[in-house]
Amino acid sequence: MDIASQKSLIRKGMLAERDGMGLDDVESKSSLIAQRFFGLDRIAGRRSFLFYADFRNEVKTGNMIRRSIGEGIGVYLPTIDEPSDQIEPVRLFEPDKELVRGKWGITVSSNGSAPIEEIDLVLLPGIAFDRRGGRLGFGKGYYDRFLSRLDKSVLKVGLCYRFQLLERLPLSKDDVPVDVVITEEGVFGKGV
């Protein structure tokens, strides 16, 4: 079976399991993941976080976003720039006032895009991750293209539930790994 077929099979199974999670389970596991994230030594000194707006039972980020803003962290959300078809960071100041539905129904900030150089930490959703930092998304390559544009010092953090963390994913040469993967059961990755 080729890599594309393997990825498709994993996507289908993981999405079915994730979509079947109950709201209480999503909320409680997301809360544990948030605690692990804020307890990471590697986030100390980083002042600009690109979050994602959770979608379809992804690990919830709303409380993490509000906490970060409250702590004076610069918070950004990804938006798709239509002409370039690439992710661009957009600064978020007031989540309750600035969020709108974007492409594919994903929540984005209504503010204008910011320089990519402002970001020093990226939190990523994924359909699956592996212990080496491999990430499986929806297959459009948006995050891979975005991550390849970032400075190497930017910390890349994947958030997922434990069942989404596999031993090894089939990866392509264009797949950009994350540095750390956080689940409700632990933190995995390089230098952890």
Image (tube, rainbow, N blue to C red):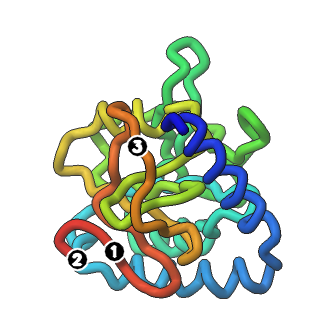
Identity of the amino acid at label 2? Val
Quadrant where the C terminus is found in the figure: bottom left
Tell me how far mark 3 sits from mark 1, CA to CA: 18 Å
Q: Quadrant of residue 108?
A: top right
Q: Which residue lies under the disc numbered 1?
A: 188
Q: Which residue lies under the disc numbered 2?
A: 192
Q: Which mark is residue 101?
A: none
Secondary structure type for disc 2: loop
Q: Which residue lies under the disc numbered 3?
A: 171
Tell me how far mark 3 sits from mark 2, CA to CA: 22 Å
Tell me, yes or no, whether the two marked residues, 3 and 2, touch with CB atoms within 8 Å.
no
Position of 37 relative to 73 (above/below): below
Q: Which of marks 2 and 3 precedes in the sequence?
A: 3
Tell me, yes or no, whether the two marked residues, 2 and 1, touch with CB atoms within 8 Å.
yes
Q: Nearer the viewer, residue 80 or 131?
A: 131
Question: How would you rate the neighbour count of disc 2 (Cα within 10 Å): few for under 14, some for 14-19, many for 20 or more?
Answer: few
Question: How would you rate the neighbour count of disc 3 (Cα within 10 Å): few for under 14, some for 14-19, many for 20 or more?
Answer: some
Q: Position of residue 147 (x, y in %)?
A: 35, 39
Furthest residue to the front?
Answer: 1
Residue at 59 percent across and 55 percent down: it is 127
On screen, residue 175 versus residue 77, left or right, reads left
On screen, residue 48 versus residue 93, left or right, reads left
Q: Which of marks 1 and 3 precedes in the sequence?
A: 3
Question: How would you rate the neighbour count of disc 1 (Cα within 10 Å): few for under 14, some for 14-19, many for 20 or more?
Answer: some
Q: Quadrant of residue 145?
A: top left
Identity of the amino acid at label 3? Leu
Secondary structure type for disc 1: strand
Q: Position of residue 174 (x, y in %)?
A: 36, 32
Tell me how far mark 2 sits from mark 1, CA to CA: 6 Å
